[in-house]
Amino acid sequence: MWWSEEEWSTLHDPEHCGMCADAHVDENPHSLLVASTVTTHLRMARNQAHRGYCIVILRDHLTDLAELRPDQLSSFWSDVQRAGRAIGATFDPRKIDYLVMGHRMPHLHCHLLPQHVGDDPLRNVDISDGPELPPLAALRRDVRSLRARWNDLTSDELLPPRT
């Protein structure tokens, strides 16, 4: 059964939104800030059951892709792509899965779940795998490495490959 009208209204309210409250802070109970743009915040999850697992969070409190203006949509996906490239360069996954859901936390965000060589490619993706909580010092090192890759990406590298 879906949320009641009262529950959904509370979840949907930016005044009660956990992502609005702390997506911009350096560290919160769930993740660490990697980078911010005018459109999004890139955060590394503390649960690293999939090493390099990050979340791209829209700065504005909107709950669905359909609510974005065309320029916001383009910027959001450009940031997701940049995050994927930075994760790829930092953690060398075989593939990255991109998940946009939001029925539990109705604030637009995209989970980037790296799939590594040792992972089972036939297993369903589950963002609640783990938890594998590396020591905070190790997580901060990974954030610094990922931030450096993020910052190294030029606009030319964000363009689609030429054919």
Image (cartoon, rainbow, N blue to C red):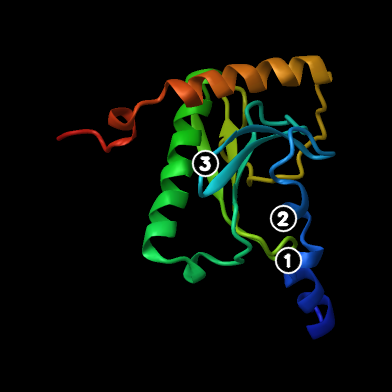
The alpha-carbon separation of the residues under discs 3 and 1 comes to 20 Å
Q: Position of residue 160 (x, y in %)?
A: 27, 38
- Give me the disc on residue 76: none
Mark closer to the chain start, 3 or 1: 1
146, 163: nearer the viewer = 146
Which is more N-terminal, label 2 or label 1? 1
Vertical arrangement, residue 1 with respect to residue 122, above or below: below
Q: Please name the residue shown 32% across and 32% down the image.
A: 155
Residue drawn at 48 percent across, 34 percent down: 84
Residue at the spot 48% in from the left edge and 24% down from the top edge = 151
Q: CA distance from mark 3 to mark 2?
A: 15 Å
Which of the 4 image quadrants contains residue 1?
bottom right
Tally the numbered discs.
3
Query: Looking at the picture, how far across and down is residue 81, in whole percent?
Result: 43, 40
State the image coordinates of residue 19 (x, y, percent, origin top left): 73, 53
Residue at which label 2 appears: 20
Q: In the picture provided, is 22 more to the left or to the right than 146?
A: right
Q: Residues within 10 Å of mark 3 (few under 14, many from 20)?
A: few
**Picture quadrant where residue 2 is located:** bottom right
